Amino acid sequence: MQERIAVVPGSFDPVTLGHIDIIRRAAALFDRVIVLVVINPVKNTSFTPEERGELIRKSTADIPGVEVDLYKGLLVDYVRSRGAVAIVKGLRAMSDFEYEFQMALINKKMLPYAETVFLTTGQNNLYLSSSLVKNVAMFGGDISGLVPRQIHDEVAARLSGVDSGKLGKEALM
């Protein structure tokens, strides 16, 4: 029987507990899951692609069958090159669905055999996004419970006001 490989793509800037939930659930459904850091040169990110990949590796080390890779290009080309049968996307709200549904349709047109699988986020992660984590951390808020504990200190240090727009905590008072 052929190995069922799924790709979980995203920018993961930074990876959150919501992402980890989707990755963990995808790993229960497929033989192997490739978490793909998609490199988008248009996006202004806080972490390099390599740093994001390493944060994901640290956060998923306890999940069997998960690997991490980086890619710049069309997702369907990557999926084809790895012999994957599915693209797994997490959904928080209807607004996520509208965008992701359009992407699923174009991906299906370009790569008919690959299915897009939507996993709804757990109720405790409905509000969670990488942007939210960045905003909370930038203003000195506690991001515990938002990012995996294995990477908390590293993410908090990077996203503190000093690194996020060179705005120190003193300037916020």
Image (tube, grey):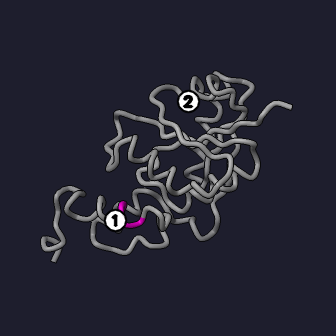
- Tell me if residue 131 is in the magenta stretch: no
Q: Is residue 134 left or right of residue 147?
A: left
Are circles 2 and 1 on residues that touch, CB within 8 Å?
no
Return the residue at label 1.
156
The quadrant of the picture occupied by the N terminus is top right
Residue plotted at (61% across, 53% down): 91
**Mark toward the start of the polypeptide (2 vs 1):** 2
What crowding class fits label 2: few (fewer than 14 Cα within 10 Å), some (14-19), or many (20 or more)? some
Q: Quadrant of the C terminus?
A: bottom left
Q: In the rendered structure, which amino acid carries the disc numbered 1?
A: Ala
> What residue sits right under mark 2 in the picture?
75
Q: Amino acid at mark 2?
A: Leu
- Residue drawn at x 67%, y 23% as measured from the top left: 111
Q: Quadrant of residue 130?
A: bottom left
Provide residue 95's location: percent of width, then percent of height: 55, 52
The image position of residue 49, as x and y in percent, is 39, 41
Residue 1 vs 169, above or below: the answer is: above
Q: Secondary structure at mark 2?
A: helix
Start-end of magenta stretch: 152-156
Q: Is residue 80 left or right of residue 45?
A: right
Q: Is residue 110 left or right of residue 151?
A: right
Q: Position of residue 63 (x, y in %)?
A: 64, 55
Q: Nearer the viewer, residue 151 or 145?
A: 151
Q: Is residue 23 above or below residue 135?
A: above
